[in-house]
Image (spheres, grey):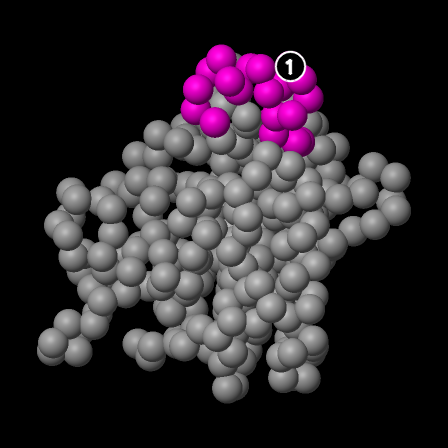
Amino acid sequence: MSNCIFSPVYTCWVAEHPKPIGTIEFLGGALFGSLPNVSYSYFLNYFYDQEYTIVTAPFRLGLNHEQIAREIYSDRQRVFDTLKPIHKTLHRYWIGHSLGCKYIILLETAGEEDGTEFFLKDQPSILIAPDMSDTYDAVKIGIIAQYLDDIGRGVNPNRAVTKARLAASKRFNLTAVISFDRDNIAGTQQQTPEEPDFSDVALITQLLEQRPSGLLFKTELENCQHLEPVGVRVVQADGSISLLDLDLADGILESVVDRKLEPQVLADLGRLIQRMS
């Protein structure tokens, strides 16, 4: 595996491949997404090695998710003006993890109600352990979260509004959802229909499957936790690659030989490409 070098471009980190076959635009989770080129270094290096240019942006922490989503998109547009002209002819793929998935949902449903604007129309996306994040998820202290909601200063849009926008959307025809069976944050696809709000993964999967097109790729990986994509790439003395991550169940340094996530994402990219052709 090659070691891609990220360079700062405006507010983003970019690893431009010399012979790209496409561009992956990545949005990480609330905390680790603040330094995605480091926190997700193994994950992102994997796709650079598959000949994708990688564009990833640290996004500011805040409760106005609508505004943050628009800032993310504005930054990305400026970055694309600096890339080699070939990128204008290649497909752009969005991959999100955790809260990053909510921003992708907001960008794809932006203005869809009245048709005044759109951001990610007809751009494929892969949602990994999607989390629609409410005020309590951001603040963690119930009384403060409730107070912020009461005075109209909580997360905007909240989970209910995001759910409504997703339910009404006619888009997401080029979407894949990947979840983890040990995820206690975003949940799993096995949540019962009677209690979908306890699992954002189940809720999002059910909503997308209920659309007339019914076109959704979905996979749940076994023995994986919510932070499966997070991990620092480590080159051993013998040249082999290991992963420094937060799941101590597999040791401080995890072997990448049997990892399932990156090959699954690559397979979903292939299926989305085939659907576009």
Residue 172 is left or right of residue 102, and the answer is right
Residue 146 in picture, x, y percent from top left: 55, 15
Give the residue pinned by disc 1.
150
Residue 185 is left or right of residue 111, and the answer is left
Q: What residue is rendered at 43% in x and 69% in y? A: 47
Neighbours of disc 1 within 10 Å: few (<14), some (14-19), many (20+): few
Residue 107 is left or right of residue 137, and the answer is right
Magenta stretch?
139-159
Circle count: 1
Q: What residue is rendered at 47% in x and 27% in y? A: 139
Label 1: state its secondary structure. Answer: helix
Residue 120 in picture, x, y percent from top left: 70, 55
Q: Relative to 119, does residue 193 appear above or below in the rendering? A: above
Residue nearest the viewer, comparing 269 with 106: 106
**Is residue 154 highlighted in magenta?**
yes
Residue nearest the viewer, comparing 119 with 141: 141
Q: What residue is rendered at 29% in x and 43% in y? A: 224
Report which quarter residue 227 is drawn in: top left
**Is residue 240 highlighted in magenta?**
no
Q: Amino acid at mark 1?
A: Asp
